[in-house]
Structure formats: structure tokens, C-alpha cells
Image (cartoon, grey):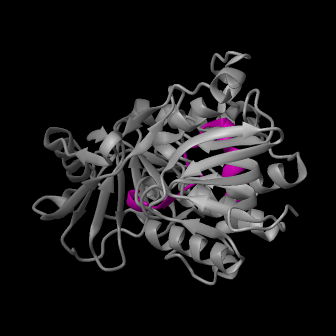
Amino acid sequence: MASLGNRTADLLIIGGGIHGCSAALHAAMRGLEVVVFEKDTVARHASGVNAGGVRKLGRHVAEIPLSLHSMSIWRRIADLLDDDCGFQPSPQIKVAETAGELETLRGRVAELNGLGYTHEQILDRQTMRTYLPAVAEHCVGAVASLDDGFAQPYQTTFAFQRKAQQMGVRVLEHTPVERVSRSGKDWTVHAAGQEFIGRFILNCAGAWGGEIARQIGDHAPIRAYAPMMIVTERLRPFCTAVVGAAGRPLSFKQMPNGTVVIGGGRPGVPEPANNRTHMQMSELRHSAQTAMDIFPVMRGAQIIRSWAGIEGLMPDGIPVIGPAAHAPGAFHAFGFSAHGFQLGPGVGDIMAELIATGSTQAPIKPFSIERFPQDPTRAQKELS
């Protein structure tokens, strides 16, 4: 569509996580020439170190249409990427430990049903135990989305990268973006001492997305966040669902090899300026205790490794998706607040449609960067 050249493309994408690679593939499928800039390596940060949950369960209401669209892609992910991404359909279940928690879950399901969504359902105590026979006796019920699942984060993001490259996308790793500027209708990305020109620019920079937004002329009050994960030794098979807790942070699943992956909201300390994170063992202990409380079989299990990634967290807990506020040709998809993995395939498709055609029927207005205070003159100031 645009003029060809080593440093010229239709679309310049900043960030080589699942959202950047998914948008790149879908844009290439729509005939756009694409360059992806990744300051480290593809999937180095949140896209490679998350829990791999593929869930519709528990979504913010505004995210549900996007999640449903993404799920339709997950179900044919092997056909799209020539790689199954380790995707395994599996129930996602959030356990209530008290009657009050179960009542709150009933209210949630009633609200969704009133909006026409039926993917979440209440499981009474007996039904819950048919899915979770090892759950603790004190648990009284659950809410579930029975046709969700989980996948391998690295494998999935690499599969998007590989297929995008097969479609002609150039992925430039170890290429940090130094500056973004605009000349006429074109955008320039200054990286690795060179200038790359594109008609469109897409900010998929994760925890670093706020700085790219600032250079575009927008304001996003993002902060870095470091969700921690635990992996245990191999245990006998006892759980085939992905499990959360209604009253406290938990993400819990047993992998096919018997290891158990535990996460769910206990943060470490991020250092985005130097790509490092620090574990907080006192917080990690809470995650381990919650797992043992919900599944007593976990008592005595040995932790074999743990880690924390770097993710972007928005103050309202939902991402920034859509056009820049006052800079034509610039777009955002970042700040997924530790639950963006499942959305990756669908949001990439939506962003490609929006950029290639100028519009989308997807309901992305709630995710506009304009929900945060913006200075209409800022774009000109930042880009001058």
C-alpha cells in the first residue's frame, strides 16, 4: 500500500509482546507492510511470563465483547498460526469460601445474564466438587466459565511472531525506540540510530506505553506492576481446571506434567528502567498459603522456581485501546493490567481492522485514552 523500502512501511508497531505481534500479523493479513520494534526480545516481558490463562471468566463488563471475539480466535489458533500454542480447553472456576462470597458471585451472574451474557454460571457445592474433587471442605460453591482454557505464553507469542514474519513483517529485536516524531501525515520512529517512516504508528509498549504515549502527545497514568508466579514440583494429577478464589488473589492450575503454577495478583517490585524485578517473599507466602487453603493436597509441595514479570497497570484496571487523542494516524493497545494475554488475538485483529480501514464495529470506546485528562495542545508540543 505505501512506498517500499527498508525503513519505510505502512505501520510501525512499538512493542514485541503478544499484542504487538498479533496486530502485526493481522495487519499483514490485511495487506499492510509492518515493522515491529522490540527493545529486548519478543515476549521478554508480560507476554512471556504470565500465567497463560485463556479466560472469559471475571472480565470487566466492557471487556466481554473483546474477550468473546478473542475466544473465537483461540478456538482456531492452530489453524491461524500453524501451532497449537499449548492451548487446552479447560473450565475456569472461581471458588467461594463463604456464603457471602457465593452470594456476590450470584449477583455477578445475574448482572451478566441481564446484559445477555451466559458464559458464566454458578456451581453449587456438589457440582463444584465434580470439577474440583480435591477442593477444601469449607468451600461452598463457585462461578465458572466452562469452555475457557489455558495456553503457553512464550509459545503463543513466538507463534504470532513467526507467522507474522512469514507474512513479511519485519521484527527488529534489541531495537529500542529512542523517539517518535511526525512530519506531515507520516510518522517517524527513531531507533538504532536510524529513522523509520510509516503512515501509522501503534503503541503496544506494555509498561513502557505511557512514555510512548507522551511522545505521541497523549497522557496515560500507567504504572509498572510485577505479578509474581510460583511453580511447584510434580504432583499426582488432582485438578484439570484453572482455579481462582472469590475473596483473595489466586490463579491456580496443574499442568499436564504435574507441576502446579500459582499466581494471581501478589506483586513484586518492578524496575522498568532497567528491565528488572524483585520478588517479595512475604507476599509470595500469601499466594502459597491461599493455594494450600483451597487445595489441602498442596501442603508440603516443594516450590521449584518463581519469577515476576513487568506489566503496565492502569488506574481503572482496563487497557488503553484505540486511536490517539489528538494525533491522526497514531493508535494505542497497552496497559492490559495483568489480564491481557487472552485478549491478544482479538485485540490484534481489531486494531488491524481499525488501522487498515479507519473504523471498527468492536465496542472499544470504554478503552479510549481520552478517559484520562488530555491537553489538546500537547500533541503539537510533544511532536514539535
Seen at 56% across and 80% down, the residue is 84
Query: Relative to residue 380, is residue 262 depicted above or below?
Result: below
| Residue 118 appears in view | no
Seen at 53% across and 39% down, the residue is 209
x and y, in percent, of residue 180 in the image = 62, 41
x and y, in percent, of residue 248 in the image = 34, 37
Q: Tag count in the figure?
A: 0
- Region in magenta: 48-72
Residue at the extreme bottom: 82
Side of 196 where 171 appears, left or right:
left
**Location of residue 323 by image quarter:** top right
**Location of residue 334 by image quarter:** top right
358 and 305: which is toward the camera: 358
261 and 326: which is toward the camera: 326
Side of 121 where 304 appears, left or right:
left
Query: Relative to residue 93, is residue 370 depicted above or below?
Result: above
x and y, in percent, of residue 130 in the image = 43, 65
214 and 220: which is toward the camera: 214
Residue at the extreme front: 193
Q: Is residue 39 magenta?
A: no
The C terminus, quarter of image: top right
| Residue 74 appears in view | yes
